Amino acid sequence: MKDKLQALHAEAMAALATLGNARELEEFRVKYLGKKSVFSELLRGLGGLSPEERPAMGQAINATKATVEEALAAREAEILAAARAQQLLDERLDVTMPGKAAPVGGLHPLNAVLNDLIDIFRSMGFDVVDGPEVETDHYNFEALNVPADHPARDMQDTFYLTDNLLLRTQTSAAQIRTMEDRKPPIRILCPGRVYRADEVDATHSPVFHQVEGLVVDKGITLCDLKGVLEQFAHEMYGEGTEVRFRPSFFPFTEPSVEVDVSCPECGGKGCRVCKGSGWIEILGAGMVHPRVLAGCGIDPEEYSGFAFGIGLDRLTTTRHKISDIRLLFENDLRFLNQF
Ligand code: PHE
């Protein structure tokens, strides 16, 4: 039995040295130290010995088992330490490496200019409202004093979806929706996309952007319109900027004006930007036609109002000296990253 014990010890120690991971350690534990292990079997064999032999043999077996247990614990610690060292090596982080900058998006120039514009008008008490891009003939034309067959329809080449539905040609449609919904005093700004069947070139696009403004209250006059637009021009282009009105025609305003600002590039002396004239046209405007007010249930004897429509694309191209409006719609990052 002693020989057997010695052989077993030698075998266990040799096996221990070959263990490499947690699973092998566990298998070893079961085989040599568990309930059904070889050592347990030896202990059970003690019954066959004489009572004199039994204690010494029992002790020898337990002592041997203890040395194997110790050796196993030591081997386990070794394996764990090696695994930990390997993990540290694998997860090593070089904190001196240069970082990777995450790409950051930016505002499209149209949105940036629009935000400035909204800030300016908000400070004068305007609310921003939204309107649908698919409009009915009523809101886009009829209610704006442009009945069917009116020659003014030719001013705007319209995309019709059905006889009655169209892509709005002007944000003015939002004027009507607002006047139907709200009681005066009204002060709103409606920015958005508009559509006209224009040929594409450097200054035309079938989709572009307008910002409609509308003020309705008691005693509103053309002077109020001029004051508001001057304030806008000063904040948008600088204090010295001048505003001038030229007579014009829109079916839904009377009188109607075309509004120019002194050229922000040359200050009015004449340059390439203003084509030598010293002025740049930025919007159309006028006093809301009494018929339009009445159609929305607002008494034109009691109230008056002005409206204006700013071309946002034009505003953006002049501000950033962009030579071709198409650049605003192509979403070429090489262009957009410059802003
Ligand atoms: N809606 C007009 C256009 O698109 C611009 C405009 C708006 C004129 C408001 C007067 C008042 O041409």
Image: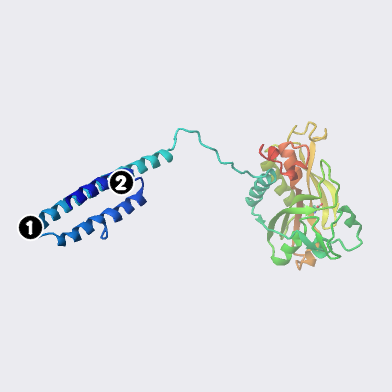
Nearer to us in this view, 153 or 225 = 153
- Mark 2 falls on what kind of element? helix
Query: What residue is shown at x 83% (from left), y 56% (from top)?
Result: 254
Count neighbours of disc 2 (C-alpha within 10 A) and say few if under 14, some if 14 to 19, many if 20 or more: few
Spatial CA span between label 1 and label 2: 33 Å
The type of residue carrying mark 2 is Ala
Q: Nearer the viewer, residue 156 or 275?
A: 156
Q: Is residue 339 above or below residue 175?
A: above
Image position of 192 (left or right of 56): right
Q: Is mark 2 within 8 Å of ligand 1?
A: no
Q: Nearer the viewer, residue 110 or 1?
A: 1
Answer with left or right where residue 282 lies relative to residue 234. right
Give the amino acid at mark 1. Answer: Glu
Q: Can you say which quadrant of the picture contains the C terminus?
A: top right
- Work out whether residue 299 can be spotted: yes
The residue lying at 44 percent from left, 35 percent from top is 95
What percent of the width, then of the height, locates residue 277? Answer: 83, 35
Dot label at residue 52 = 1
Position of residue 39 in the picture relative to residue 106 (left or right): left
Q: Position of residue 336 (x, y in %)?
A: 68, 40
* Mark 1 in CB contact with mark 2 (< 8 angstroms): no
Q: Which mark is nearer the camera, 1 or 2?
A: 1
Query: Which image quarter: residue 313?
Result: top right
Q: Is residue 241 visible?
A: no
- Quarter where residue 148 is shown: bottom right
Sequence-first disc among 1 and 2: 2
- Identify the residue position indicated by label 2 in the image: 15
Q: Position of residue 108 (x, y in %)?
A: 67, 44
